[in-house]
Image: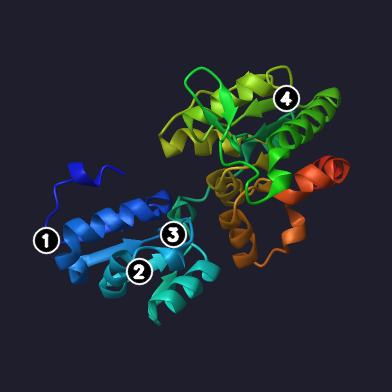
């Protein structure tokens, strides 16, 4: 994200899902356009309206040595826009982690892990507030955040009433702030955020069931072989389960959070993963 601070050598590797926003690609094209043939773009999520990226950014991507995306759908779209037949699909590298068993299935405590994150709000430094653009293109999104919180509250309350221990699994610092703001009474343990993948993977592996929101909370649940109910807050989550051969109806879609609250709660309670 701080390309202006990077020391650029003869070979460039741009990796990581969130680096594919328009501004980052434009910066790289402007600063390193002459090194396109020595550049690899690996596992990047091209966010926004990719076909409308600036011409210079698209021209740069046409010339880079290697491009791969984390979903088949996006690899096809990027290939079509750039008129390249060598845009590759590879699963996120979190799938390359060592196999981890689920030790919690043999002990007596039932643990429900969940990951919550803001959907249409932003952290201002002391509270979450609606994003100023919310609802401009999709009116239902004005109600999305509260519906999402309501679904989680009802589902977590139901699990608590059945004796489950509820643990929040943060994948970003803001996740912890969000869960503590809206879901404090529904949560028994708030795990601290750690950037060490071994920490969060170990916590996921100790759960009996997961409610995932963030992309990597879904991946780690799958990797750790934990039954998971995915909230498909972003297209990348939907693309992932499609690439794995799972029907979209298995997860909970954004639109359904607003229009089918009871069905969403029932799906979380009934889905065995």
Q: Secondary structure at mark 3?
A: loop
Residue highlighted by disc 1:
10
* Residues at discs 1 and 2 in contact (Cβ within 8 Å): no
Badge 2, how many Cα within 10 Å: few under 14, some, many 20+? many
Residue highlighted by disc 3:
46
Pick whichever of labels 1 and 4 is earlier in the sequence.
1
Give the Cα separation between the discs numbered 1 and 3. 24 Å
Horizontal side, residue 41 vs residue 267: left or right: left
Horizontal side, residue 261 vs residue 103: left or right: right
Pick whichever of labels 4 and 3 is earlier in the sequence.
3
Q: What is the number of the mark on residue 258? A: none
Q: Nearer the viewer, mark 4 or mark 2?
A: 2
Residue at the front extreme? 136
Give the Cα separation between the discs numbered 4 and 3. 38 Å
Q: Nearer the viewer, mark 3 or mark 2?
A: 3
Residue highlighted by disc 2:
67
Residue highlighted by disc 4:
165
* Residues at discs 1 and 4 in contact (Cβ within 8 Å): no
Residue at the left extreme? 10
Pick whichever of labels 1 and 2 is earlier in the sequence.
1
Horizontal side, residue 76 vs residue 40: left or right: right
- Name the residue at 43% across, 53% down: 17
Q: Secondary structure at mark 1?
A: loop
């Amino acid at each position: 994200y701080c390309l202006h601070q990077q020391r650029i050598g003869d070979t460039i590797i741009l990796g990581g899902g969130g680096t594919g926003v328009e501004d980052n690609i434009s910066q790289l094209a402007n600063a390193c356009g002459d090194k396109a043939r020595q550049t690899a773009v690996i596992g990047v999520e091209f966010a926004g309206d990719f076909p409308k990226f600036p011409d210079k950014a698209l021209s740069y991507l046409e010339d880079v040595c290697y491009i791969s995306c984390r979903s088949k759908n996006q690899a096809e779209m990027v290939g079509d826009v750039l008129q390249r037949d060598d845009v590759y699909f590879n699963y996120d590298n979190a799938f390359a982690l060592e196999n981890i068993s689920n030790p919690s299935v043999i002990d007596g405590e039932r643990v429900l892990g969940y990951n919550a994150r803001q959907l249409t709000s932003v952290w201002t430094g002391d509270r979450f507030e609606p994003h100023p653009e919310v609802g401009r293109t999709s009116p239902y999104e004005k109600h999305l955040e509260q519906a999402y919180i309501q679904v989680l509250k009802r589902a977590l309350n139901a699990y608590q009433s059945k004796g489950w221990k509820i643990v929040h699994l943060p994948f970003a610092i803001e996740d912890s702030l969000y869960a503590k703001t809206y879901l404090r009474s529904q949560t028994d343990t708030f795990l601290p955020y750690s950037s060490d993948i071994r920490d969060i993977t170990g916590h996921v592996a100790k759960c009996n069931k997961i409610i995932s929101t963030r992309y990597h909370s879904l991946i780690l649940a799958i990797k750790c072989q934990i039954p998971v109910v995915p909230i498909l807050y972003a297209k990348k989550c939907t693309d992932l389960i499609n690439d794995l051969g799972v029907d979209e109806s298995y997860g909970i879609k954004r639109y359904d959070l607003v229009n089918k609250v009871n069905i969403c709660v029932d799906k979380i309670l009934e889905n065995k993963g």
